[in-house]
Amino acid sequence: MTTPKVITRFAPSPTGFLHIGGARTALFNYYFAKHMSGEFRLRIEDTDKERSTDAATQAIIDGMKWLGVHHDGDIVFQSKNSEDHAKAAMELLERGAAYRCYATPEELETLRDAGRDGDTAFRSPYRDEEKVLDKPHTIRFRVPEGKTQITDHVQGDITWDNKNFDDLVLLRADGTPTYMLAVVVDDHNMDVTHVIRGDDHLINAGRQTLIYEALGWKIPQWAHVPLIHGPDGKKLSKRHGALGAEAYRDMGYLPGGLRNYLLKLGWAHGDTELFFTEEQISKVFDLEGINSAPARLDFDKMDFINGQHILQEPNKNLLELASGFLTDLNEGTLSDDLEQRVLAAMDTLKPRSKTLKDLAEQARYLMLKRPLEITGKSSKPLRKEDAISHLSALTLRLKSLEEPNWSETEIQRLLQDYVSEHDIGFGKIGQPVRAALTGGAPSPDLSWVLTLLGKEETLARLEDVITSDFAKD
């Protein structure tokens, strides 16, 4: 007997952005399909016309594309499958597994109020009505007696007493399907073998199992993933950072870094925390590694993992990824010379950057426009006694350093020789030089600052200070 190809799906409602909970669900489906050499499909559940928007649909598609989660085949739009949904409802009617309910909204409210103290969920009085009446009606599922059991890859074995399930509506009075019917029909039509989703849908697995059984269809395997909680252990909300994927992109997270963090948020493979390639993840991802307890959002861990991905990213790629942040700080597109300066500095920028925004801030000293605005606390080293005279003397020495010898090693030696000859602490010259060259912006070791700025820019910035008002103080 041939084992069917594994097919998973991500089925968001287009009512907003791709938030991180949805992104993690998409990743789990995506990598499990990859691990099993199967397919990962995307279905947009757009049957709620009042809340579904084209903009939200595009935001979800764009978010998945940026995150690097690529679906197989065409996107399925649930709203285009209404005929199949209605056909399934009619088949359930013919099988006696569904019935027409003629109760008005007012009658339903009265019936529900009357049944609140009972030990059985809602059952319509039209459940046993055999005659077809000429009046508006819904089609409801006829919940059978007995119990329903599922085996979930994450939650284990779960059993429900069917008396606790409502006779749920399958088709509304206007003929449109409800979520519960549409999902079953669409998953069946798409040959979905594994339904991996949030555990807020766990009880729906019981209801949907009954519909599958009533239609005689093969039931998919279930895996219900605990939801993400905030750092305080409470349900994730906007105040915790329940933002869209584009918000994390705009904060400077790398797609690979965010993928890695979300993947590890509730899933484990031994002690391994860092996965730098899709192949590494696809090789080991399985449903058994998903934790049954809720995971907590941890921005420190997110930053750490993203920082590790920045370290691993090739310098040219990183320059391209950070270009928007660099342009914003530079207040304009970087010139070719500035790009080369930042690229040359990349190995000093990466270890001190958790995000691309950090990296741009660390590179700010390389892009400052002359003359630098040096004020406040940053200007204090330049106002100290002998600061300008030391800068002048050091500048003369730097001028004599030939261009081929303008390197971190030679500059470090020149600085050390200067402080030794003048019998002063390194800070006596290091602090004013750093102030003159960086204006107080974050920067690496001083010898690297001079090396990466280059001889021409270094001398020009020093001369600006030497001839400025600081020399008159």
Image (tube, helix red, strand yellow):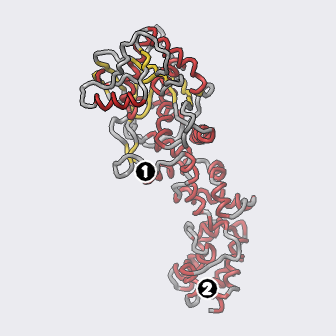
The answer to whether mark 2 and mark 1 are in CB contact below 8 A is no
Q: Position of residue 77 (x, y in %)?
A: 59, 28
Of discs 2 and 1, which sits in the foreground? 1
Left or right of 128? Residue 341 is right
Q: Residue at x 55, y 83 (%)?
A: 380
Element assignment for label 1: helix
Left or right of 343? Residue 272 is left
Element assignment for label 2: helix
Of residue 216 and residue 458, the one placed in the foreground of this image is 216
Q: Which residue is mark 2?
A: 390
Vertically, is 374 above or below 206? below
Vertically, is 178 above or below 94? below
Image quarter (top left, top right, bottom left or bottom right) of the C terminus: bottom right
Of residue 322 and residue 418, the one placed in the foreground of this image is 322
Residue 469: tell me if it is visible: yes
- Circle 2: residue type: His
Q: Residue at x 50, y 49 (%)?
A: 306
Q: Which residue is mark 1?
A: 301
Residue 166, quarter of the rendered image: top left
Q: Position of residue 229 (x, y in %)?
A: 38, 45
Query: Dot 1, how many residues are within 10 Å of its Cα: few (below 14), some (14-19), or many (20+)?
Result: few
